[in-house]
Amino acid sequence: MRRQLLAAVLLAVLMPAAAQQIVKFERGTVALGDSVEKMLKIAGKPHAILPPEESPPGFKVYEYLTPTENIRFTVGAGKVVGLGIGRR
């Protein structure tokens, strides 16, 4: 019984964290660890690529705008290593 309760609590806590690591687009989803090529194929051309002085050292930040959200993918070594979603 304790194990089932612990599993249910862990599932409830971890589900929102997993959901935040994936962004859905019309052509599919982009997740942490995906390649830059996959991100560009699914998300399309970015609205902007932030200049180096506005990005973490050694990384590029791709910005996508939707009517309701501002989505930023941080890319390093050819992979998506971070993402942020802000409401507009």
Image (spheres, rainbow, N blue to C red):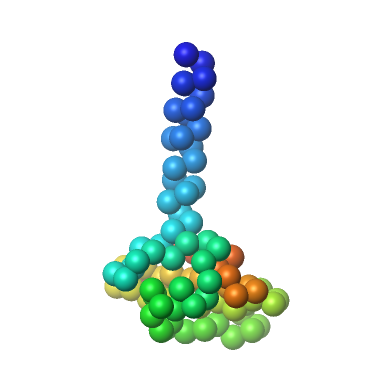
Q: How many marks?
A: 0
Image x and y of residue 88, in percent: 36, 68
Depth order, front residue of 45/53? 45
Image x and y of residue 13, in percent: 48, 37
Q: Residue at x 51, y 16 (%)?
A: 2
Task: Judge from the rendering whether residue 3 lies leftward or rightward of residue 56; answer left or right.
Answer: left
- Compared to residue 32, the image places residue 26 above or below, namely below
Q: Which residue lies most toward the top here?
A: 1
Task: Judge from the rendering whether residue 58 lies leftward or rightward of residue 30; answer left or right.
Answer: right
Depth order, front residue of 23/65? 23
For the question of whether residue 82 can be seen, the reply is no
- Compared to residue 48, the image places residue 12 above or below, namely above
Question: In the rendered image, which quarter is residue 86 located in?
Answer: bottom left
Q: Residue at x 48, y 71 (%)?
A: 72
Task: Judge from the rendering whether residue 83 lies leftward or rightward of residue 24; answer left or right.
Answer: right
For the question of whether residue 61 can be seen, the reply is yes
- Compared to residue 36, the image places residue 23 above or below, namely above
Task: Judge from the rendering whether residue 37 lies leftward or rightward of residue 54; answer left or right.
Answer: left
Depth order, front residue of 38/16? 38
Image x and y of residue 6, in percent: 51, 24
Q: Residue at x 47, y 84 (%)?
A: 48
Q: Residue at x 49, y 27 (%)?
A: 7
Question: In the rendered image, which quarter is residue 43 located in?
Answer: bottom left
